[in-house]
Image: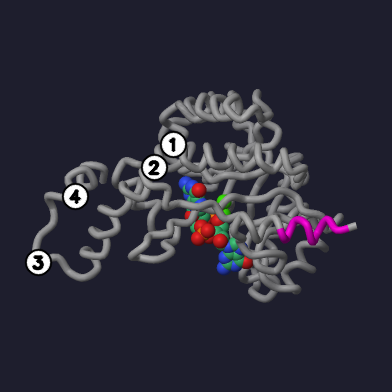
Amino acid sequence: SKEVGRNSFQLFKPSMNARSLERFAMMSRFQYALENDEFELYFQPKQCLRSKAIKGVEALLRWQDPALGIISPAQFIPLAEELGLIVKLDLWVLNNAGMQLALWQQQGITAGRLAINISACHLSQGSLSSSVEKMLQRYNLSGNCLEIELTESSFISSFSQAKRELWQLKKMGVQIALDDFGTGYSALSYLTKLPIDTLKIDASFIAKVPDEYGNSEIVAAIVAMANSLNLKVIAEGVEKLAQYSYLLELGCDVIQGYYYCRPLTQRQWLEFYQLQNQP
Ligand code: C2E
Ligand code: CA
Ligand code: CA
Ligand code: CA
């Protein structure tokens, strides 16, 4: 809880085990890291299945700690939540995404929208849309270049607040994707009650396609549902040709995963983009 997070320094005891010591070390480093720009965005392109072209890029956060090495967001996002620093971290991502977008526009890079991940708890704070608006103004950008990936848990704590925020974003031209689709609370009514543009089928379903019975059918059903609701659909975690072929056959719009491209540093991403766009 936040309470524990705030008092974590007082919780230090010599009796702590190795795991909580490691956690403690990470917590105390985290705040410092946020002030000192130890974070970096990696970029993973998405591919349009029909045209084979790049269809947007997702920004994925990395923490490079001088002592601890590269730390995965799966580890530090929960930590940031516990420390009450998640909104601050999201704002760092938002601002850096804006900086990147402005830079890419200067360089003539047109690779579709840049998608950023926003933590579930952020939406209920009611400040996301105004932060996005300020960022767009700061970098002189249109909302049309931005996409926000949210999980279903974003809507749980305050549905009406979330709805207001999403409509604000929508008005600016920002698109909304539902991340990890199929793993959450699966209240399908969200799909018609909220301005959602895209479903991202969770990687756990894709991992078992096409072999494991039942999974291919679930994926097929999600794609069909998305198509009939006029939502775009992305499959994430596509690693193998068999998965790619199956998704192509289903009429899935876009894929993302190691099969197409791994998350890349900013420099690697520019190289990838240039290779794809060679005359
Ligand atoms: P996610 O949004 O579902 O992102 C997909 C994750 O799968 C990424 O892990 C990505 O590197 C990984 N991935 C991509 N393609 C493949 C593949 O073909 N196979 C496999 N096995 N994995 C693949 P990553 O970068 O470690 O991020 C983990 C999670 O952390 C993300 O899941 C997202 O929920 C969160 N996260 C990442 N960046 C941010 C951020 O800037 N802000 C917030 N709030 N959360 C973030
Ligand atoms: Ca995501
Ligand atoms: Ca996901
Ligand atoms: Ca995920």
Q: Is residue 183 visible?
A: no
Going from N to C along the chain, the mark reached first, 2 or 3, is: 3
| Marks 2/1: CA–CA distance | 8 Å
**In what element is the residue under mark 3?**
loop
- Magenta span covers which residues? 271-278
Q: Mark 1 is on which residue type?
A: His
Going from N to C along the chain, the mark reached first, 4 or 1, is: 4
- Ligand 1 within 8 Å, label 1 CB: yes
The answer to whether 93 appears left or right of 87 in the picture is right
Number of callouts = 4
Residue matched to label 1: 122
Residue matched to label 2: 86
Residue matched to label 4: 8
| Marks 3/4: CA–CA distance | 15 Å
Foreground label between 4 and 1: 4
Q: Are marks 2 and 1 in contact (CB under 8 Å)?
A: yes
